[in-house]
Every structure is written in structure tokens, then in C-alpha cells.
Image: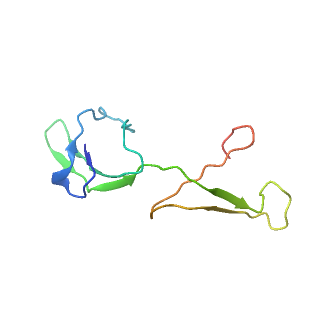
Amino acid sequence: MYIGFKPSKVDLNKFENCPGVNSSSFVISKLEHKKRYYWYMIVKNKFSAFLETEMYCFITGGMVEKFYNAPNPFSPIKDGKTCFVFCMRCDGTARIVIYFEYGDKV
């Protein structure tokens, strides 16, 4: 696996501690906060045949400074809708996870 900050394969660093055979997940610790990372993989089989993936990117999470919703979704209202509003400093993808009051994911 190769990972780094620049959108060019030649500028990415090889990450040595990659997952083993048949792994379905991979965790990289110590990524920088609020940074865009580019990555790709070269996968080899036991016959030394290999496949090089496309380059992908992701942005590590940042803290949301202000967040609100209206109307309160837990109050009885006619249409049962609410709107979640928050600001992001740059374009990207947001994910929201909603939990019941006792901590169970909805």
C-alpha cells in the first residue's frame, strides 16, 4: 500500500505494515487531522502476478464547530421531519450517526 498527501503515485510512500492474506479491513493509526490523503495498492498473488489499483483519496475528520437541528425531531410534530445544519470548512463528504437517548445506534 502506498499513501501520502500528493495526487501522484510517484510521490506516495510505501506503507510496510499492510494487512495479511484474506484481510477485509486495515487500520492506519497516527494520520494527521483534517488532511487529504491519496492511496493505492499493488496486490501480488503467490505466482507473482500483480494488480495495481487506481489512486483513491479520503479526508481525515475534523471537528464540527456548530451543529443544530430544527424542529426538534423528538417532539410530536405534524410531518415528522427535521433539518440538520452544520458548516464545513471545505467541500467533502459528511456522515451523521444518530443514537437513541440510551446510546443505541438508530
Rendered view: 89 above or below 47: below
Q: Is residue 53 left or right of residue 31?
A: left
Residue for point 52% across, 49% down: 63
Q: Residue 86's quadrant in the figure?
A: bottom right
Is 12 placed above or below 88 here?
above
Look at the picture and state if 97 lies above or below 15.
below
Q: Outermost residue toward the bottom?
A: 79
Colouring of the image: rainbow
Residue farthest left in this picture: 48
Residue 24, picture quadrant: top left
In this view, the residue farthest toward the front is 65
Q: How many marks?
A: 0
The front one of 106 and 86 is 86
Q: Is residue 64 left or right of residue 22?
A: right
What residue sits 86% from the left and 59% below the top?
76
Residue 75 horizontal/vertical position (percent): 84, 56
The image shows residue 64 at horizontal and vertical percentages of 56, 53
Q: Quadrant of residue 91?
A: bottom left
* In this rendering, position of residue 49 left or right of residue 20: left
Residue 77 at what x, y percent from top left? 84, 63
Residue sitting at 15 percent across and 53 percent down?
10
* Residue occupying the point 35% across, 35% down: 23
Quarter of the image that includes the N terminus: top left
Residue 104 pos. (x, y %): 69, 39
Q: Nearer the viewer, residue 20 or 72?
A: 72
